Image (cartoon, grey):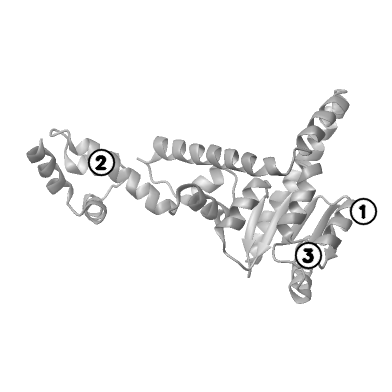
Amino acid sequence: MYRVLIADDEMIERAVLYKTLHKNLGDQCAIFQAENGREALRIYEEEKIQIAILDIEMPGINGIEAAQRIRETDKDCCIIFLTAFDEFSYAKKAIMIRALDYLLKPYDEQELMLVMEEAMRLTDAHLADAAALSGRGQAAGMGAGETAAAQEPREEMEEDGNIRLSKVAELISQYIRENYMYDISMQELARTMNYSEPYFCKLFKQCFNKNFTSYLTEYRVEEAKKMLEQPTVNVKEIGKAVGYGDSNYFAKVFKRITGQSPTEYRLYIFQRG
């Protein structure tokens, strides 16, 4: 059975979450409860917790601090944050801690179950990897190296998180550069990068300070501007080339971003040149 920890200082919230998990996963999970971060850390140690669902705002040791302490010695525990506060500073900390997901209260039950299923899949994968290493006689050497990495000073975690955030931003940018001409969506990109949609939405805004739709639209318009500088290329073909099959819609989007229609922009470019 998977060993799951729920930590939330609100008794009713904790009870509802326990009931939800028990209803859906009762025969697959042993579920433990904590009412604060200190108790959560104690249960984590005693029960060798594999999946931790942590409320962020708890008295004393909060969910972020508890997760940091878990992560210092355990790279594999699946950490899921719950919070009633939609703050990007929390999302950034969740990235640095390598949390699996970041859910807002009131959470959607289906969304929660999708995250739990992913957490269980990852737990199985971690166990399989550990067994494979042991089978090859490499567990001792690899274990020592991983422990050393886990014991990096806490002040280095933020630097590591910023590096991870930069890498994520580059992967997103690369995907959009290679696929902007197709009918792509935030949902598709989130699935491609193995993130839940709500978490990816926050992650994207943290990386680019705007949402996916705005970023993609502006990128497409910039590519269209380059094509409009070529006088032999038809405006309708330019719209299709940057992902807009409907030329009228392309013209509307282009004017909303630039203040000019594609034809007006082309004329302006030629007059200026």
Relative image position of residue 67 (x, y in whole percent): 75, 53
Looking at the rendered image, the disc whose residue lies closer to the viewer, 3 or 1, is 3
Left or right of 190? Residue 244 is: left
Relative image position of residue 164 (x, y in whole percent): 59, 39
The numbered mark at residue 224 is: 2
Find the distance from the CA under tag 3 to the CA under tag 2. 54 Å
Residue positioned 67% across, 55% down in the render: 115
Element type where label 2 sits in the image: helix
- Amino acid, disc 2: Ala
- Amino acid, disc 3: Gly
| Neighbours of disc 2 within 10 Å: few (<14), some (14-19), many (20+) | many
Residue named by callout 1: 46
Quarter placement of the C terminus: top left
Give the mark, 2 or 1, whose residue is nearer the N terminus.
1
Element type where label 1 sits in the image: helix
Left or right of 140? Residue 221 is: left
Looking at the rendered image, the disc whose residue lies closer to the viewer, 2 or 1, is 1
- Amino acid, disc 1: Glu
Relative image position of residue 152 (x, y in whole percent): 75, 37
